[in-house]
Amino acid sequence: MFDNISQGLFLTGGTGYFIVVPILRFMATIFMAISTYKILKIRNDKYKTYWLFFIFISPILTRIIYEIYRRWIARKLDHTILNIKAPKSSNILLIISIIIFIIIVILSIISTISMGLGFIKSYMDNEPIAAAYDVYGNEYFSYMEVPLYDKEGNIYTYEPAWLVMGNYVDQNGNIYDGDYCYLDEDGFLYYDKDKKLKPHKVHDGYYTDGNNIFYCLWHYVYWDDKGVVYEKSGRFSIELFDFEK
């Protein structure tokens, strides 16, 4: 399932922190909102819309503030609500919500530790957390290390630039303007030094010489273990040439 222990620790922790925790938090917030609404409704609180709004922003803090308001401030302002108690169902939902929030705290700590251990082990043992590959299937520690090749066998590395397209440098130190570097359908770099390529009429970001299709490079490019090529764009990876599938 995982390529190594470092990847397993990191991805397991990441799944817990970025997927499971948000789902649990949503569930706990819903339970908290319903619990609070039941009290607001039975008390006919005219500010219930505002209370519920802040419940979704900060469930625990808002509920604590509301309980302080309900038990002390509101009673002094309106003595007719002294005997109005929270419905039993509201208390049950409140307890469920609190239990889930406790689980969230525990899971967040465990997930953070797992990701940290995965990162440390990856660094210490040189185990890639998310291995990347070149067009020939060679494995690299990071997508930033993956080189590109042209059909003549020359090797190119990407040098990023701030806010603009970076350049590519070959094994001899020659610099190639990134604005004219493309990736062909076979995964090889093509340098359009004569500016012959034209924008493809159907697919944005792609160019053509009339017969073949090329992708205009903007960021790092890497392959997965199945040979699918991606471009790394910020936090996301974009599959290239997927319009043919």
Image (cartoon, rainbow, N blue to C red):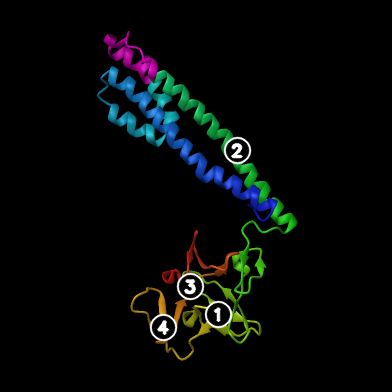
N-terminal of the two: label 1 or label 2? 2
Residue that carries the numbered disc 1 in the rendered image: 188
Q: Position of residue 22 (x, y in %)?
A: 47, 41
Q: CA distance from mark 2 to mark 4?
A: 51 Å
The CA distance from mark 3 to mark 4 is 17 Å
Question: Residue at point 66% right, 63% down?
Answer: 141
Q: Main secondary structure of the magenta part?
A: helix
Which is more N-terminal, label 4 or label 2? Answer: 2
Q: Tell which tag, 1 or 2, sits nearer the viewer.
A: 1
Query: Could you say where residue 87 lies in the image, as x and y percent from the top left?
Result: 36, 15
- Secondary structure at numbered mark 2: helix
Mark in front: 3 vs 4? 4
Residue 208, given in percent of the width and then of the height, sits at 41, 83
Q: Nearer the viewer, residue 64 or 139?
A: 139
Q: Which residue is mark 4?
A: 208
- The span from disc 4 to disc 1 (Cα, nearest Å) is 15 Å
- Mark 3 and mark 4 lie on one chain; the one further toward the N terminus is 4
Q: Residue at x 39, y 36 (%)?
A: 57
> Cα distance, mark 1 to mark 2?
44 Å
Among numbered discs 4 and 1, the one appearing first in the sequence: 1
Visible in this render: residue 133? yes
The image quadrant where one finds the C terminus is bottom left
Report crowding for label 2: few under 14, some 14 to 19, many 20 or more residues within 10 A (C-alpha). Answer: some
Which residue is found at the position 28% from the left and 9% from the top? 79
Which segment did they paint magenta?
A: 69-89
Residue type at mark 3?
Trp
Tell me the amino acid under the disc marked 4. Answer: Thr
The mark found on residue 218 in the picture is 3
Q: Which residue is denoted by mark 2 in the rendering? A: 109
Q: Check residue 85 for magenta coloring.
A: yes
